[in-house]
Image (tube, rainbow, N blue to C red):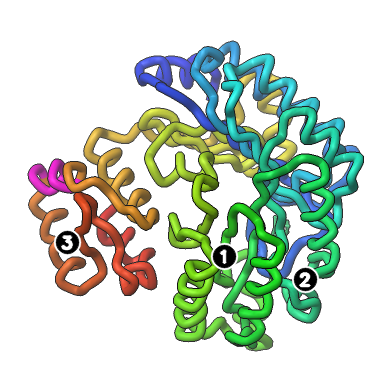
């Protein structure tokens, strides 16, 4: 698509604020469970990607005309952003500052591999503007880390958290994974105990999934690995909620927990229907009711940008009712839920949707409290089914 037509579409929408997501599509090795668009790092490919990304940042800022929209969060994800050097990461961040209106109090997050960070890099990243680190710990059991494949040893995560604190990062999140084949409550409890000792401000606890395109998918399909036990996953999810609540963490989304005042503001955008612009191959965007996604091909991404066009492969302009439905479905992922006035607006204009909602309530999956509709504990287990029903 050329940048002028996307500009025309976006110029008809109003954008009170924006979050930026930067997709760094490289990893050192591919984890067994991963089905994301990533490539194994190669210097030549990284340099070509950086050239494309620089062009994309300039295109959206200057040509598409988003340069004056206040940017309240920037999130570097992947892939593994820390396969880039701190100099390269800071160069990208400088380009963002030159082309967008990044607010002085913006949350600027970096997903980091625990084994790829030294004190010197962390010092320069912190002083260069990054103020939040999300470290992919996964587990604090070395045997489990080997089973998941491609991860560091647990002591590396301890050292990474320690070094990040010394460099001045106060806002540190750890990513953990539970419910893989063979996982047990005692071993998950041990990982949570170590995590609590490290006192991160934020935790993401994801259930192990078998996604098409991953190595584990092939193994499960080929019969060499058992699929995860759903009952065990439900048990561990409930255990996680209770254990982390007692430890002073507040669950604010199905998979996310934080100390008071430390939710991930960038991710909240996804669940609250706020605008975000994704840059980099395969990155997804939602800007004021327009959903669009980038080409999931590094070469095509680069050549499209070299020709002066935005590397977008599909654009969907949602009508007001579709926007309302999405707002409700994504909002239900938050523990607080969705204000009843949003629910009532949609219920009034769509009898079928209202009927579906009432069925979910009668099944005990949704409930009303404090002026909001929210998922019940049972609803959290079946969140994906609820979403499909309400979309
Ligand atoms: S580090 Fe993340 S993106 Fe990279 S292979 Fe592992 S799960 Fe996938």
Looking at the image, is 165 positioned above or below residue 150? above
Q: Which mark is residue 61?
A: none
| 50 drawn magenta | no
Q: How many marks?
A: 3
Looking at the image, is 62 positioned above or below residue 31? above
- State the CA–CA distance, disc 3 to disc 2: 41 Å
Q: Earlier in the sequence, mark 3 or mark 2?
A: 2
Name the residue: 45% across, 76% down.
238
Determine the secondary structure under disc 2. loop
- Residue beneath disc 2: 149
Could you say which is closer to the camera, residue 297 or residue 278? 278
- At which x and y percent is residue 150? 80, 66
- Rendered-image quarter of ligand 1: bottom right
Residue 346 lies in quadrant? top left
Is disc 1 surrounded by few (<14), some (14 to 19) or many (20+) residues within 10 Å?
some
- At which x and y percent is residue 276? 50, 33
Judge depth for marks 3 and 1 and give the one in front: 1
Residue 61 lies in quadrant? top right
* Stretch of the chain drawn in magenta: 343-349
Prevalent SS, magenta region: helix
Q: Which mark is residue 356?
A: 3
Looking at the image, is 323 positioned above or below residue 388? above
- At which x and y percent is residue 44? 89, 38
Q: Earlier in the sequence, mark 3 or mark 1?
A: 1
Name the residue: 47% across, 21% down.
6
- At which x and y percent is residue 198? 71, 62
Residue 130 relative to residue 275: left or right: right
Q: Which mark is residue 205?
A: 1
């Amino acid at each position: 698509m050329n940048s002028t037509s996307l500009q025309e579409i976006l110029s008809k929408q109003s954008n009170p604020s924006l979050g930026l997501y930067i997709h760094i599509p490289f990893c050192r090795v591919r984890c067994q469970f991963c089905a994301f668009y990533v490539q194994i790092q190669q210097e030549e490919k990284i340099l070509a990607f950086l050239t494309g990304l620089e062009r994309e940042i300039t295109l959206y800022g200057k040509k598409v005309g988003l340069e004056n929209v206040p940017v309240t969060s920037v999130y570097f994800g992947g892939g593994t952003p820390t396969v880039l050097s701190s100099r390269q990461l800071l160069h990208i961040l400088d380009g963002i500052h030159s082309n967008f209106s990044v607010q002085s109090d913006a949350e600027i997050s970096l997903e980091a591999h625990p084994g790829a960070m030294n004190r010197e890099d962390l010092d320069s990243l912190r002083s260069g503007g990054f103020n939040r680190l999300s470290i992919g710990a996964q587990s604090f059991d070395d045997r489990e880390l080997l089973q998941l494949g491609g991860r560091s040893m647990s002591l590396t995560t301890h050292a990474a958290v320690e070094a990040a604190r010394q460099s001045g990062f106060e806002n540190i999140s750890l990513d953990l994974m539970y419910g893989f084949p063979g996982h047990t409550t005692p071993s998950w409890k041990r990982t949570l105990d170590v995590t609590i000792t490290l006192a991160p401000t934020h935790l993401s606890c994801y259930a192990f999934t078998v996604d098409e395109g991953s190595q584990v998918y092939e193994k499960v399909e080929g019969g060499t690995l058992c699929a995860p036990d759903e009952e065990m996953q439900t048990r561990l999810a409930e255990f996680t909620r209770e254990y982390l609540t007692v430890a002073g963490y507040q669950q604010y989304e199905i998979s996310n927990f934080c100390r008071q005042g430390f939710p991930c503001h960038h991710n909240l955008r996804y669940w609250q229907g706020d605008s975000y612009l994704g840059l980099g191959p395969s990155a997804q965007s939602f800007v004021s009711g327009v959903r669009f996604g980038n080409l999931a091909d590094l070469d095509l991404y680069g050549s499209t940008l070299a020709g002066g066009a935005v590397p977008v492969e599909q654009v969907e302009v949602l009508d007001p009712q579709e926007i309302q439905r999405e707002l409700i479905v994504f909002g239900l992922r938050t523990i607080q839920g969705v204000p009843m006035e949003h629910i009532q607006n949609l219920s009034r204009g769509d009898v079928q949707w209202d009927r579906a909602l009432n069925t979910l309530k009668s099944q005990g999956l949704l409930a009303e409290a404090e002026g909001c509709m929210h998922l019940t504990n049972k609803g959290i287990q079946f969140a994906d089914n609820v979403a499909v029903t309400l979309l």
